[in-house]
Structure formats: C-alpha cells, structure tokens
Image (tube, grey):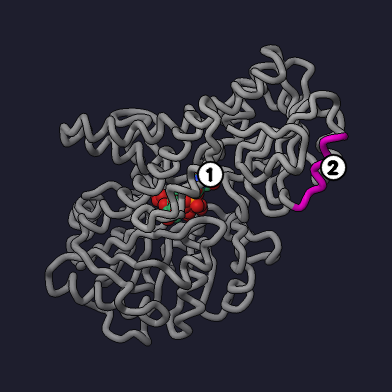
Amino acid sequence: MAIKKMKNIKICCIGAGYVGGPTMAVIANKCANVKITVVDSDKDKINRWNGDLDNLPVFEPGLKELIELNRNKNLFFSNEINDAIRDSSIIFIAVNTPTLESGPGAGFGADLKYIRLCAEQIARVANEDKIIVEKSTVPIKTAEMLNEVFREINPKYNFEVLSNPEFLAEGTAIEDLLNPDRVLIGGDNTISGKKSVKILFDIYSKWIPKEKILTTNVWSSELSKLASNAMLAQRISSINSLSALCDKTGADILEVSNAIGHDHRIGKYFLSPSVGFGGSCFQKDILNLVYLCRNFGLNEVAEYWHQVVKINDYQKKRLTNKILDNLGKDLSNKNITLFGWSFKKDTNDSRESASIYITKDLLELGANIKIYDPKSSIDIIINDLLNISNLSINELNQRVTFYDDHVKSVVDSNCIVILTEWDEFKQFKWDELQNKLSYEKIIFDGRFILNSIYTNKVITL
Ligand code: NAD
Ligand code: UGA
C-alpha cells in the first residue's frame, strides 16, 4: 500500500455535486494537512465552484463559508481529472447513480455507467496503488464490478475498494457532515483492506468520535445505505397513507403524527405528512432495492418496498385531485400559484420534487402556473418541466410564470398551493395574500405548515 502517513495524504473526489462538494469542503476544513482536489467532467460546474461565492452550484447553509475558508488552500476544484487521479492516493467516487432509463432493469435498477467510467479512467491513468472509496449510493456488489474493471485494465497495482456511503440530507448537509449520527466504512478483511479502512477511519476521527465510526464488510456497508433510505422513506409513506384515512374520518394527521411520535420506540422524526417525498435519492434507492430483491427471486420483499413508492405517487395525485374537487374539473383559465419548487427547504435542488409532477398534471388540466421559490429560477423550473411534460418551451414560457416577489405571484390567482416547507412562508401575511386571490380564496397546504387560524379556508391532504 503506497499510503503510509496521514500527513502525505492527497485526496481526489470525482463528482463535484451535492455530495462531493460539501463532503470535501468539510474534510478539507477538518484536515488542514490533507490536500483535496474535487474534479468533475462538467466544466461550468467547476467554474462555479471556483467563482462567486454567491453563485456556487450547490446551496447549503454554511457551505459558502467553508468554501471561502479552504478554497485554494487545501481544497481545489478542477477539470483536470487525470492529473488529480495520478496525484492522489485516495480517490472518492461521488458521481450520480440515477435510475436506469433503458435496457434490463429500466425504471428500477441503478445506472452504474458513471461509476464504471470513473473506474476505467482511474485504472487507465493510475501509476501506483490507490484506495478507491465508493461515496455514491450503489447496489450491493458494486465493489465486485469495480474490482473486475481494475483487474482487467490495470492488474499491475492494488486498488483497494472501500464502501463509505454518505448519509447527509440536503438543506442540513454541513451540519450532518460535521456531526453525523454515524460514519460507515466497509472494507475487505485482508491486510491491505484493513490498512485502508484504518486510513479512512483516521481521517474521519479528526472530528468524529471514534464510537460513531462503524466498520463493516463491504457488502453490509453497501446494503446499509439503501436500507437506511428505504426505512426513512417508509416512515413518510406510512404517515402519508394515514393522512388519506384522516381525510375520510375527521382525524387530524398532525395530531395523529404527534401522538404516534411520542412513543420513544417510534420517535418523532420523519413523521411529517407531506405532499410526498422528493429528492434525487429516496425513490431511486427504493426502486433499486426492489430490483435487487427481484433479482434474488424475493418477489414478496420487492413488492413490500415498492409499495412505499406507490403511496408516494398516490399522495402527489391526491393533492391534484383536491384542487380539482374545489376548483372544478376544467382548470383552463384558472391561475394557480405554487409556493415552493425545491424538494425541501434550504436547498436549491428540485430533483424529483413533488412540485414537478403536480405542475405537469395541472398544466395538462389547462391551468396557468405562477411560482414563487426562494432559491429556484425560471430556467431550472422550465428545464424540470421540459424533461417531463409534452409542452414545448414556448408553451411553457407562456403558461408558467416565475416571481421573485411572493405577493405579486398571488395577484389574480384562484388558489395558492404550498409545496415546500420554506420557513419564510410561515412569516407571510396570509390574510392579506388571501384577499389578493381572484375569487376562490383557497389555500392548499400540501406541506402542513399553515394552520387554519391564518386563513378562512386552508385545505390539507
Ligand atoms: P450530483 O448529480 O449532484 O453530482 C454528481 C456529479 O458527478 C455531477 O456534477 C456530474 O457531472 C459528475 N460526474 C458524473 N460522471 C462523471 C465522470 N465520469 N467524471 C467526472 N465527473 C462525473 O449527484 P449527488 O446528489 O452529489 O449524488 C452523488 C451520489 O451520492 C449518488 O449516488 C447519490 O445517490 C448519493 N447521495 C446523494 C445525496 C444527496 O443528498 N444528494 C446524499 C447521499 C448520497
Ligand atoms: C435523504 C436522507 O435523509 C439522507 O440520510 C440520505 O443521505 C439522502 O436522502 C440521500 O441518500 O440522498 P434528502 O433526500 O436530502 O436526504 O432529504 P430528506 O430530509 O430525507 O427529505 C427527503 C424528502 O422527504 C423531502 O421531500 C422531504 O420534504 C420529505 N419528508 C421528510 C417528508 O415528507 N416528511 C418527513 O417527515 C421528512
């Protein structure tokens, strides 16, 4: 193993996205003697990481301050991927692993093409032993695929593959990285495997208590990541399924959630009812788990987890149906204001946001859409909709309007729909906003942040 001393360590992270950027910023901040180069094939993204602190590609509370402190000291952003690989003894792979769009496993399995491309590139350019860290979320046995690529292309050197999944949540990424519930490192039970685990362990133990750094075999680590996301999402689908029952019976889902969460064996977290979970990971990771189970012939297990995603889709449709029940089946000539576009508060990320699917349905039903979100822009919104709707860019530009002033966004609207739980929405003067609506005076609270005290008529799921 080429890596001997902590003070010599150079890290390359392939993938400068929502995981690579914040994670490396925190490691750089906590380990001044480690040099980190974050690389990406997307030149524009790297330029933004190197540019104006108010225009970084990722918005996260606390991130800009860390970048300001460490950039060009021991933290670098670059497009020179080969140089960074050659120069580093530890290579993190933090590229995207989206759901497969075609071929076997389409719609369920994880597309590992970006992971494979990274492995091939590392194998082609490496001229010494390396530790390879799977930071991306991957299906169990991905390390085996990486090992095959390394053996095939570059049998001369030892590439020690570790699994070190990331558990940060967007919006709280920096806090999660600084104070994680746990860090998981999976490695092989060989001399070089154990040495490599120790090296990564030592990096994390610079700021994380040792008892929170769990070491396992590679397969347990890979599976624990998918399983953790599945369990979290399952709680949301469970509470959302009960919100439908509350709706029919007069029970209040917030009261029910509160009562359930008081049982310390259940706990209060991840029991907030919503318009459905979004984000780039929950759905993709559960579908991947479903695919894995099916591949192992575990059809009942696959069906069990698939139901979590099905309830999530059902919840999004329920909101659209509520709007139709109240505004009539024909939404043409109706203006609908959406508060919130990102999939949760405190992030500029809108991947898989419920807002995209709800807007698509509302547009198909004829509505015009007005949007206010503190961190999204019209470009992001139009791009999200182009990927999913049949409407042309011209039609979208005519029927979707973006506002940077929430008061203006409600003028002449028939209703307001709350789709993200941004804190600032709670401070709005709801009575005044309601009076600006054209006639229906209805607010649909898909995120349960309002309470009917604020308005005459709030409809929740
Ligand atoms: P992202 O799309 O924000 O970033 C991935 C980056 O990798 C992109 O900038 C892309 O250009 C780059 N890339 C892809 N292939 C490349 C290649 N061959 N060479 C160089 N660059 C390449 O994705 P993300 O949200 O950071 O997620 C990355 C992984 O981490 C995924 O597997 C995801 O499931 C997992 N994860 C994400 C989160 C999250 O909150 N976003 C949390 C935990 C784990
Ligand atoms: C989630 C996990 O929380 C992270 O641990 C994990 O690392 C990450 O996925 C990942 O693998 O990508 P993230 O998707 O960023 O993090 O954000 P969450 O806070 O989990 O929220 C996901 C969605 O669930 C959001 O739309 C949120 O609004 C929704 N949600 C969350 C609810 O509807 N109810 C809740 O009680 C909690």
Horizontal and vertical percent position of residue 427? 76, 53
Horizontal and vertical percent position of residue 124? 31, 58
Horizontal and vertical percent position of residue 150? 23, 57
Q: Is residue 276 left or right of residue 377?
A: left
Residue occupied by mark 2:
407
Vertical side of 82 occupied by 321: above or below:
above
Please give the name of the residue rendered at 50% of the width and 34% of the height, measured from the top-left corner.
Answer: 243
Please give the name of the residue rendered at 62% of the width and 31% of the height, measured from the top-left corner.
Answer: 385
Residue occupied by mark 1:
255
* Residue 171 appearing in the image: yes
Judging depth in this view, the residue of 357 and 323 nearest the camera is 323
Disc 2 element? helix
Which of marks 2 and 1 precedes in the sequence? 1
Judging depth in this view, the residue of 192 and 208 nearest the camera is 208
Disc 1 element? helix
Magenta segment includes 433: yes
Residues in magenta, as a range:
427-435
